[in-house]
Image (tube, coloured by chain):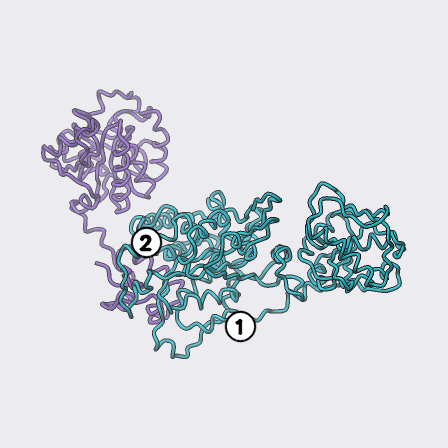
Chain colours: A purple, B cyan
Amino acid sequence: MDIIEIDENDENYPIRLKITKQHPKVIYALGNIGLLESKNTVGIVGSRDCSEYGRKVTDLFSSKLSRKGICIVSGMASGIDTHAHNKAIENAGKTIAVLGNGFDYIYPPENEWLFHKILANGGCIITENKKDVKPDLSKFPKRNRIISALSDAILVVEAQYRSGTSVTVKYAKEYKKTVFAIPSNIDSTKGVGTNRMIAEGALLTTKPEEIIDSLKNAEYSKEEIPNEYKNILNIINNNPMNINKIAKKLCMKIQDINATITMMELEGYIIKNDKNEYQRGK
Amino acid sequence: MYKLMCQQVFQVGNVFGLPDTSVKESKERVRTAIKNSGYQFQSRKIVVNLAPADTKKEGSIFDLPIAIGILINFEEIKCTNLKDTIFIGELSLDGKINRVNGVLPICIEAKKLGIKKVVIPKENVNEAAIVKGLEIIGANNLKEVALYLNNEFNIEPEKIDIEQIFSTSKKYVLDFSDVKGQENIKRALEVSAAGGHNCLLVGTPGSGKTMMARRIPSILPDLTFDEALEITKIHSVAGVLTKNTSIKTERPYRSPHHTISITSLVGGGRIPKPGEISLAHYGVLFLDELPEFNKNTLEVLRGPLEDRTVTISRVNASLTYPCNFMLVASMNPCPCGFYGSKEKECTCSNQAIAKYMGKISGPLLDRIDIQIEVSPVKYDKLQNDEKIESSQEIKERVNKARKIQIERYKDYGIFSNSELNPKLIEKYCKLGEKEKKILQDAFEKLGLSARAHGRILKVARTIADLDEKETIETKHIAEAIQYRSLDRKYWKN
C-alpha cells in the first residue's frame, strides 16, 4: 500500500483539519482517505494503562457508535485507543488512527496487528510526520490536536491526572467540540482526570445514545422503511396481532414472516407484548 | 458367549461358573423339561460349567444350551459338531422354549465372533433375522431342537426382507392436517424435527401443546438402517419389543408421566436396564407439563442431553447406553396457566410465576434449542375449512434437510445439526458480516443470554438446510432468533 501525501491545498485535505489554526502543512495517509470526510466522527481517547472498567466502557461505546455508522478517531496507542479501534472494526464500522510518528515505525510495537487490521478492514491511518520520524513520547501530545480537529465530539473514557488526554481535551475546547467524559469511582486513580473534566464542564455521559443525539448530522440514520415492513405495520396498525394472523393476512409463508418479524423487532419497528402478539414500537 | 461343558459325575446336578439365581434354578427347569420331552433323565451326577467361570451370568437364556449339553451327554443327541453354533432360550417345564429378551444384541455379537448358526425361541426369530449372514433356527420346543440336531426334523432358517420392511410406508393416526391454525408452531416443530433440536412449548391450557407434540412422530425423518438396528438392540435388551417386530422402523416416541422416578428415566437396576431416555434413542422423549416433574428427575437429564450416552454404574455392572433423543417438553406459563392469555385473567403473583419458571433450571433450559409460545386458536378459526398441510408434506422437507446433514457429517459419526460441538459449529455455521451484526443486535436488544449463541447458530444451520442453502443467510439467522424469544419474557437472566 502506498503512502498518500496530502498537501493542505489538496482537495482531499480534510476540511475539519484545515479550519484549525495549527493544522499541519502536509499529512501522510494510508488506507481509505475517504473516511477523513465522514459525516459523523467521534474521537475516543483515554489512558494507555486502562482499567477493566475502562475497557468495557470503550467496547460498549465504540461498538454502538460504529454500528450507527459513526467513524471512530483515536491514536492507536495501547489501552483505550486500541479497544476503540478494534471494536469499530469488529462491528464493521469506520475508524481513523492518528499516529505521532512516521510510517517506518509502528508504535507501540505490540500493536502491529492492529495497524494491519485497520488497513485490511477499510480504515485509515494518518500522520503529519515524514516516513522516518521515530516515535517520541514527548511529541505525541502534538498529534492530539489532529484527533481533536478530526472529531465532531470527543469521548474521554479514562484519564489520569495531567495526561496526554487532557491535551486532546484542551484542543477540543479550543475547536469548540463537545467533550463527553465517562465518570469513574472517586477513589480510582485511573479516573481522576475524567472526573476532573466533568467538574470543569465536560458532559457526563453514561449512554452511547447521548453522544449520537448530540451529533449535528444525527438525522442521517433515519432510513426509508422497506416495503415489506410497511405492509406489516399497516396490518398491525393499532391492533396487536398474533404472528399467524399477520402471515395469513399477507399470504406470506410462516418462515418468511418469522424472519421479517425478527428483523423488525430488532430494528425497533414493532415489539412483542405479553400476550404473544406484535404491536407497533415507539 | 459362554462355553458349556457337561460331565457325568455321580448323581444330582450342579451348575458352576458364577450363575445367578435364575441360572441356578435352571437345573430344575431343565431336568423337568427333558423328562417331559420324553427323554429318560438318567440318575447320575451332572456337572454343568459355564465358562469362563469368572464372569457373572444372569437370566434364563441358558436353559436351552444346558439342556442340549445334557442331552448330548446322554447320547440322545448324536450330532457333536456344534462348533459355531449358539443356543439361546428359556425352557418351560413342558419342554416349550419361551421367548427371551436381548436376542438381537447377542446375535450381532455372535456374528462378530464368527458364529454361523443360532438356535433361538421361535418367538424371537423376527428380531434375530435382521442380522445378515447368520442361519437363524427358530424352535418351538426342546424335542424339536433335539430332532433337528439329529437330522430327523427339518427347520427352515428364517429369512427376512429388510428392504421390504423399510419400504412399506407407515400410517400415522395422528396427522398435522388435524391442526388448524398454529402455523408458527408447526414450523418450529418442523425445524426441530429436521435438525433433531430439543424443543419447549409454552402456552395456556387448551392451546394445543400436547396435541401438536403427539403429532411429531408423523414428521420425523425416516430411520436409516444403522439407526434402526441400534434402536432395536436397546428395545430388545429392555424387553419391550413386541412379538412380531423384527426391526423398529419408526422412531420411538416416549412420553412418561410426570411421576416417573430417576431410575426409570435414565435406567438402572441391579444389572442396569435402559431407561426411558435410552428407549427414546433416535426418537422423541416428550415430557408433558415439565414443571410438574420432580426437579431432581429433570436435572439428571442434563448430562445425557449433552453426552448423548448415559453410563449407569451399579455394584454388579456398569453399563453405557446410548440416549440420543430429541427432547420435546410442554408447560404452562404460570401456575394458574393463564399468564399472557387474552381470554382469562392470570391470578398469579409475580413471585409465583418466577417460582414456577424457576423449576426449570437454567442449565436444562440451555440445552433446549427451540422455545416457542403457543397461543390458543380462536373458535372462528377452528371453523373454517382451509386446506392444511399434511404431515407427509412436512416430512418430505424434513427428510430432505436431514439427508443434507447426514451427508455433511458422515465423517464425524453424527446425524444432525443438534449434535454439533463448538468446533463443528465454527466450521459449519459461519456467518457473514451482516448476519453477525444481526445476531449481535439481537443479543443487546432482545436481552438474549450468552448461552443462546451456539443454539441459535445450530438452529439457523437447520433452517438453511430446510431452505437447501449452503450458507446461513440473514433470514435464516433472523428466524432462528425468533425461537429464542422466550428467554427474555420468562427467564430474565
x, y (%) of residue B65?
78, 53
Q: Residue at x 67, y 65 (%)?
A: B243
Q: Residue at x 27, y 41 (%)?
A: A60
The residue identified by callout 1 is B173
Chain bearing mark 1 = B
Q: Quadrant of residue A13?
A: top left
* Label 1 secondary element: loop
The residue identified by callout 2 is B355
* Label 2 secondary element: helix
Q: Work out whether residue A162 can be spotted.
A: yes
x, y (%) of residue A64?
26, 44
Going by the numbered disc 1, the residue's amino acid type is Val
Labels 2 and 1 in the same subunit: yes
Q: Quadrant of residue B42?
A: bottom right
Task: Classify 10 Å Cα crowding around label 2: few (below 14), some (14-19), many (20 and above).
Answer: few
Nearest to the eye among marks 2 and 1: give it. Answer: 2
